[in-house]
Amino acid sequence: MYKVEMLGVRTLVAEGKIVWTEHVAIRLRERGIKRSDLIECITNGEIIEQYPDDVPYPSCLVSGKCKTGKPLHIVIGYNKDILCCMITAYRPDMDKWENDYKTRRKGI
């Protein structure tokens, strides 16, 4: 499988080639996160973990911030030049993540 590249994700998002799964829609409602927050996070964020063996598409974890400056994590499936699949989004838990929101705490 291939690694997800942030430039490719940004390009697909800018072109509107996004699939919003039912799962992400539920999680966004539960967590008070807007779709526009995900777009902003992708614009300023970076890939912090790769999941190349995910099915049906390789995926990645993006860390960034929404317009309010709050940190946000998004799991995105990526089918090269075809689409980005928004899988889930959440606010990182400081019990699990270091202050940079990019590094998992040891032993968790």
Image (cartoon, rainbow, N blue to C red):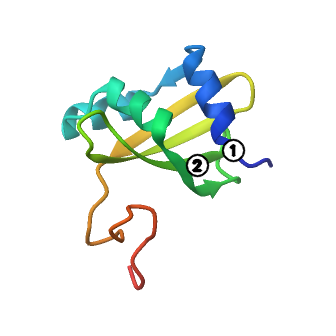
Q: Which residue is mark 2?
A: 60
At label 2, the amino acid type is: Cys
Kindly identify the residue that appears in the image at 26 percent across and 72 percent down. Answer: 95
Q: Is residue 103 left or right of residue 82?
A: left
* Cβ atoms at labels 2 and 1 below 8 Å apart: yes
Name the quarter where the C terminus is drawn. bottom left
Residue at far right of view: 1
**In this rendering, position of residue 59 left or right of residue 74:** right
Q: Quadrant of residue 27?
A: top left
Judge whether 14 appears above or below 53 on screen.
above
Q: Residue at x 68, y 32 (%)?
A: 8
Identify the residue at image location x=23%, y=37%.
68
Residue that mark 1 sits on: 4
Q: Which mark is residue 71?
A: none
Of the image marks 2 and 1, the number of the one nearer the N terminus: 1
Q: Amino acid at mark 1?
A: Val
* Quarter assignment of residue 59: top right
Asked if 83 appears above or below 76 in the picture, the reply is above
Q: Nearer the viewer, residue 8 or 90?
A: 8
Query: Circle 2 — which element?
Result: strand
Q: Is residue 65 toward the left or the right of residue 53 in the image? A: left
What residue is rendered at 39% in x and 27% in y? 22
Please count the marks in the image. Answer: 2
* Position in image of residue 79 (x %, y %): 70, 31
- Cα distance in 3D space between marks 2 and 1: 7 Å
Image location of residue 26, percent across then percent down: 29, 32
